[in-house]
Image: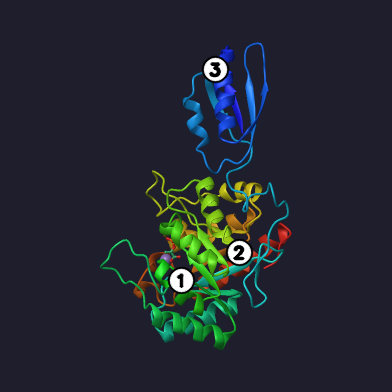
Amino acid sequence: MIVVMRPYATREEIQRVENRLQELGFNTHPIYGEVKTVIGAIGDKSRIEPFSLSNLPGVEAIVPILKPYKLVGRELKKEPSVVDVGGGVRFGGEELVVIAGPCAIEGEEQIYQVARAVKAAGAKVLRGGAFKPRSSPYSFQGLQEEGLKLLYQVKKDLGMQVITEVVDTRDVELVSRYSDILQIGARNMQNFRLLSECGKTKKPVLLKRGLSSTIEEWLMAAEYVMTEGDSRVILCERGIRTFETATRNTMDINAIPVVKELSHLPIIADPSHGTGNWKYVNATARAFIAAGADGLIIEVHPDPEHAASDGPQSLKPEVFDELMQVLKPIAQAIGRKL
Ligand code: PEP
Ligand code: MN
């Protein structure tokens, strides 16, 4: 980091900052100017809060040089990562990956019906919530282990990879037994214990962006998963809270090029939760693919009017199929395949 001293900081002030940095184990490299002095500090920042140095007399600013995230950033790994989730499905390669399925698994007939339809339309991964993080404790909370078993049964029968959300550290082991990918939801993006426990499983993790999280906070959350070793993370932009109330959330399309520049991890988009309205899903899905997203996650339900959760934003299978057709030429136009 660099410590920028105020204009005309005194020699004593500069010396005091240097002494403090050296006490903390940093090597200091001051560059004295007529008006302004800056001090380069090289060392391990993990034991201090660098911004506490700004309280010292004469200090104007602390400027970090390296990004706070190391494993997810491009500084240490330049090439994009391709995350292999098994079954020949890879996120971040030339081929786009579409995840589709109901918000919640409601029963055997429903999950088979959706799975067959989305597979026929070209989805490679089946989604289905078994533990649902609902805003109200009185809303449907998911079929839990029974739902996981159904998901696993469909996976085996139809030969699809599956993803489901894990909402609590106590369920990580159970969910890992049934699911190819662990989904960490928006509400849990900064549940640091959950991030670490999911990382320890070494399963691929789909990390949704928090409802009110900055891109940096989101990448730091991914860093928690990745510090557990050989962990694979796929990021998912699912809309953030803004002053706008016409849609459930506001999808941040900027996140795609920004994350691509800052991180080597693949990133997909969730226009279902991003808009909260099935009528807007296809338009935003097209835009996110055009912007460079590595795939999509879309809620599909055979009978959205009677869905146990998120019916208003769920596509009917035929509308999902239309979307898949429309995405193909868009993918091709930007050098991707679907
Ligand atoms: C979901 O995918 O069903 C879900 C709850 O998403 P999010 O965490 O983005 O709200
Ligand atoms: Mn949902």
Q: Nearer the viewer, mark 3 or mark 2?
A: 3
Rendered position, 69 above or below 157: above
Instruction: State how far apart marks 2 and 1 are (Cα).
Output: 16 Å
Q: Nearer the viewer, residue 196 or 325?
A: 196
Queried on whether the Cβ of the residue with tag 3 lies below 8 angstroms from ligand 1, the answer reads: no
Instruction: State how far apart marks 3 and 2 are (Cα).
Output: 46 Å
Q: Quadrant of residue 232?
A: bottom right
Identify the residue at horizontal 48%, vertical 58% (top origin): 280
Measured from the top left, where is residue 36 in percent x and y? 62, 16
Q: Residues within 10 Å of mark 2 (few under 14, many from 20)?
A: many
Measured from the top left, where is residue 67 in percent x and y? 61, 42
- The answer to whether mark 3 and mark 2 are in CB contact below 8 A is no
* Mark 3 vs 2, N-terminal side: 3
Residue holding disc 3: 13
Kindly state the secondary structure of the residue where label 2 is placed.
loop
Residue holding disc 1: 172
Q: Residues within 10 Å of mark 3 (few under 14, many from 20)?
A: some
Q: Nearer the viewer, residue 202 or 183?
A: 202
Measured from the top left, where is residue 41 in percent x and y? 63, 32
Kindly state the secondary structure of the residue where label 1 is placed.
helix
Amino acid, disc 1: Val
* Mark 2 vs 1, N-terminal side: 1
Amino acid, disc 3: Glu
* Mark 3 vs 1, N-terminal side: 3
Rendered position, 24 above or below 222: above
Q: Nearer the viewer, mark 3 or mark 1?
A: 3
